[in-house]
Image (cartoon, grey):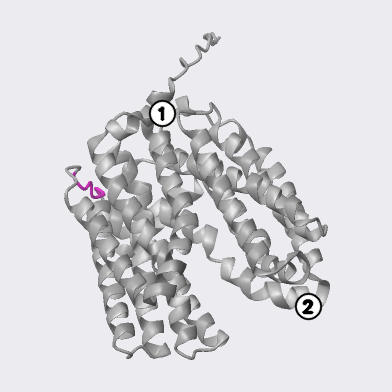
């Protein structure tokens, strides 16, 4: 008969301890480089959009350019995970930063010289998307190698999430100012330089790449092995399926129909900018709240936090005043940071290092693959059934799906002390 031992709570951490991860030299070097490149890459979409429109392009042209960035990301995610496991994450990320920096520098030169037709923009943005798709799974796999004290891993992910949140607020605002004063070419040149900073930080890391022991196998064989490992972890494929359907049914309609309702009922672009700005501020707040905190059941806490994403869609569907929509966006932003931090940390804690690249790529592919379908379908469905009705379906789905996932023992009862899966 097993004897249950008394669980001793972890000692409270002082506020200064919450930044102890910055004492990890390798992580700090990477954090500085990544934050710098992230700011530049968050500025670039504004410059790209105005490059198309200022060059006489139509809304359809802009749609083609935006799609040319997203589609390659989805297509190369699996390749990125496989290469990260074969060669090591650092090398792949370094090559991705160099590739994206060269693309943005060439884009800036073409704009500055007046030789940037839409076709050239589509081609350059597609290569940019390839670089992003290769970077994403490698990024998920490298963080554990940079933090020697594993109890600080959650804080490291929190700081990286904070960087993303701050950049989503500061990047577009800064890009708008620079574009208005100096033009989009300067923004893209800045982006190219920030990728250079990121590449230098990666080149200076002392942490060795750890290729997979199975690196000599066939590509298909390694992908099959990765898929087998992915499907044997219910907590992983269930949360991935939930995130994929969230992007399809909740987030994509919100991004398309939110501006539409704002234009009709809430005051136009300024109102929508306020909503998304407060969402970003909420993500920053959520990241700050997560520093130094390591909940005992991380996936359960992440699942509860994810329920907040239902609120903005529900507020818009109900015809709520702008103040209520903004408040809902704030809660959703906090939840997004909490959910993202805990999910990234659980992946790094429970997936063996030699599988992390591939399993991260399978997770990212499952989460984002069907999102573009939601973007394309939201408009026609709103014409048929009404924007409020489409958003309400998404809000209800988020609550119901969240409750179902929280009811799964593999998700609800997962605890840190269980150790990595094997």
- Image x and y of residue 230, in percent: 46, 50
- Image x and y of residue 358, in percent: 38, 54
Q: Is residue 44 visible?
A: yes
* Residue drawn at the location 49% of the way across and 37% of the way down: 288
State the residue in front, 56 or 344.
Answer: 56
Which numbered disc, 1 or 2, marks the residue closer to the eye?
1
Instruction: Provide the major secondary structure of the magenta segment.
Output: loop
Of pointers 1 and 2, the one earlier in the residue sequence: 1
Q: What residue range appears in magenta? A: 208-213
* Residue drawn at the location 44% of the way across and 88% of the way down: 55
Quarter holding the C terminus is top left
* Residue drawn at the location 43% of the way across and 35% of the way down: 154
Which circle marks residue 289 in the picture?
Answer: none
State the residue in front, 259 or 73.
Answer: 259
Q: Which residue is mark 1?
A: 18
State the residue in front, 104 or 264.
Answer: 264
Q: Secondary structure at mark 1?
A: helix
Establish if 414 lies above or below 334.
above
Q: Which residue is mark 2?
A: 383
> In the displayed structure, does residue 369 sit left or right of residue 16?
right
- Image x and y of residue 28, in percent: 28, 40
Contact between marks 1 and 2 (CB within 8 A): the answer is: no
Quarter holding the N terminus is top right
- Image x and y of residue 33, in percent: 28, 51
* Residue drawn at the location 50% of the way across and 50% of the way down: 231
List the single residue furthest toward the front.
181
Q: Secondary structure at mark 2?
A: helix
> In the displayed structure, does residue 218 sit left or right of residue 394?
left
Count residues near mark 1 (Cα–Cα under 10 Å), then give few for <14, some for 14-19, many for 20+: some
């Amino acid at each position: 008969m097993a004897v249950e031992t008394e669980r001793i709570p972890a000692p409270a951490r002082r506020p200064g301890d919450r930044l102890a991860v910055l004492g990890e030299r390798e992580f700090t070097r990477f954090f500085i480089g990544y934050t710098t490149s992230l700011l530049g890459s968050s500025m670039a979409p504004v410059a790209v959009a105005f490059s198309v429109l200022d060059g006489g392009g139509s809304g359809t042209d802009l749609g083609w350019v935006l799609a040319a960035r997203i589609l390659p990301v989805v297509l190369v995610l699996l390749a990125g995970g496989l290469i990260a496991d074969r060669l090591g994450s650092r090398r792949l990320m370094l090559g991705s930063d160099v590739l994206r920096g060269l693309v943005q520098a060439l884009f800036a030169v073409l704009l500055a010289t007046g030789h940037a037709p839409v076709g050239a923009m589509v081609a350059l943005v597609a290569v940019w998307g390839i670089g992003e798709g290769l970077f994403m799974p490698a990024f998920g796999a490298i963080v554990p190698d940079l933090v020697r004290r594993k109890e600080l891993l959650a804080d490291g992910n929190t700081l990286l999430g904070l960087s993303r949140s701050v950049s989503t607020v500061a990047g577009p605002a800064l890009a708008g100012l620079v574009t208005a004063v100096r033009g989009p070419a300067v923004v893209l040149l800045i982006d190219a330089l920030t990728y250079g900073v990121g590449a230098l930080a990666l080149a200076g890391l002392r942490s060795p790449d750890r290729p997979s022991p199975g690196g000599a196998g066939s590509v298909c064989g390694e992908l099959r092995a990765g898929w087998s490992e992915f499907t044997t972890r219910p907590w992983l494929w269930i949360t991935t399926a939930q995130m994929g359907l969230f992007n399809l049914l909740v987030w994509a309609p919100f991004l398309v129909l939110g501006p539409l309702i704002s234009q009709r009922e809430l005051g136009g672009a300024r109102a929508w900018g306020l909503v998304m700005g407060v969402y970003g501020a909420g993500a920053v707040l959520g990241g700050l709240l997560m520093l130094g905190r390591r909940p005992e059941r991380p996936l359960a806490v992440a699942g509860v936090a994810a329920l907040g994403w239902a609120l903005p869609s529900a507020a818009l569907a109900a015809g709520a005043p702008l103040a209520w929509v903004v408040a809902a966006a704030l809660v959703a932003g906090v939840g997004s940071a909490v959910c993202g931090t805990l999910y990234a940390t659980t992946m790094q804690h429970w997936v063996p290092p030699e599988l992390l690249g591939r399993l991260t790529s399978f997770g990212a592919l499952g989460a984002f693959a069907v999102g573009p379908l939601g973007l394309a379908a939201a408009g026609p469905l709103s014409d048929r059934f009404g924007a409020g009705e489409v958003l309400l379906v998404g809000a209800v789905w988020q609550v119901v799906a969240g409750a179902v996932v929280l009811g799964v023992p593999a998700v609800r009862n997962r605890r840190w002390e269980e150790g990595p899966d094997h």
